[in-house]
Image (spheres, rainbow, N blue to C red):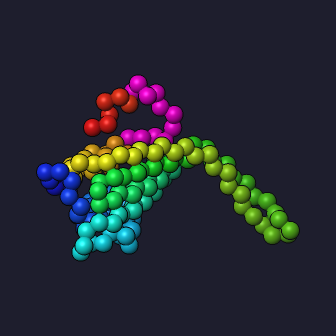
Amino acid sequence: MTDHEGWQWDADGLQQTLEALGYDVMTRDARRGTGGGSLRARREQASRTHLLAIDAAGRYRASVSRIREERGWSGEVAGAPVRVLREVKGTTTVSGQVESASQIDALLTYLDTLDAGPRDERTDQGQSK
């Protein structure tokens, strides 16, 4: 995406950026021709899942989830075999509003650095821009 003076909704450009980074993008609510709406995107990589929603005003909400522990076992219920999987996940949510297209690129890079676990707030100061 290219930087603009202020935020300009470009659903097609945003979709291309997200897909190039491996996101599956839902554009059902994008209202391309008339502007407005929102995009939702999802990316799964190994034990991490990224969910991102961003609207035409630049407001976003992103969640990064990571499987912390996974344990599986086999069993039987009423004579039918079952496989049980227990997962413990951690999720970190980031929300705000971007003011330029270049901030989207920085936001996506930042999401890749999150480990979806407890963080010391002192280490995150200054990371917002």
Check residue 115 for magenta coloring.
yes
The residue positioned farthest toward the top in the image shown: 122
Q: Position of residue 120 (x, y in %)?
A: 46, 27
Tell me: 44 left or right of 85: left
Q: Position of residue 81 (x, y in %)?
A: 78, 67
Tell me the magenta residue range: 113-123
Residue 32, quarter of picture = bottom left
Tell me: 124 left or right of 2: right
Residue in view at x 82 percent, y 63 percent: 76
Give the number of callouts.
0
Q: Position of residue 70 (x, y in %)?
A: 63, 48
Q: Position of residue 4 (x, y in %)?
A: 14, 53
Q: Is residue 1 above or below residue 109?
A: below
Q: Nearer the viewer, residue 41 or 80?
A: 41
Examine the rendering and report whether any part of residue 14 can be seen: yes
The secondary structure making up most of the magenta span is loop
Q: Which quadrant of the rendered structure holds the C terminus?
A: top left
Q: Is residue 92 above or below residue 20?
A: above
The residue positioned farthest toward the right in the image shown: 78
Q: Nearer the viewer, residue 28 or 113?
A: 28
Residue in view at x 50 percent, y 48 percent: 65
Residue 75, quarter of picture = bottom right
Examine the rendering and report whether any part of residue 112 can be seen: no
Q: Which quadrant of the rendered structure holds the N terminus?
A: bottom left
The residue positioned farthest toward the bottom in the image shown: 33
Residue in view at x 58 percent, y 46 percent: 89
Check residue 125 for magenta coloring.
no
Q: Is residue 50 above or below residue 39?
A: above
Residue in view at x 25 percent, y 68 percent: 35
The residue positioned farthest toward the left in the image shown: 5
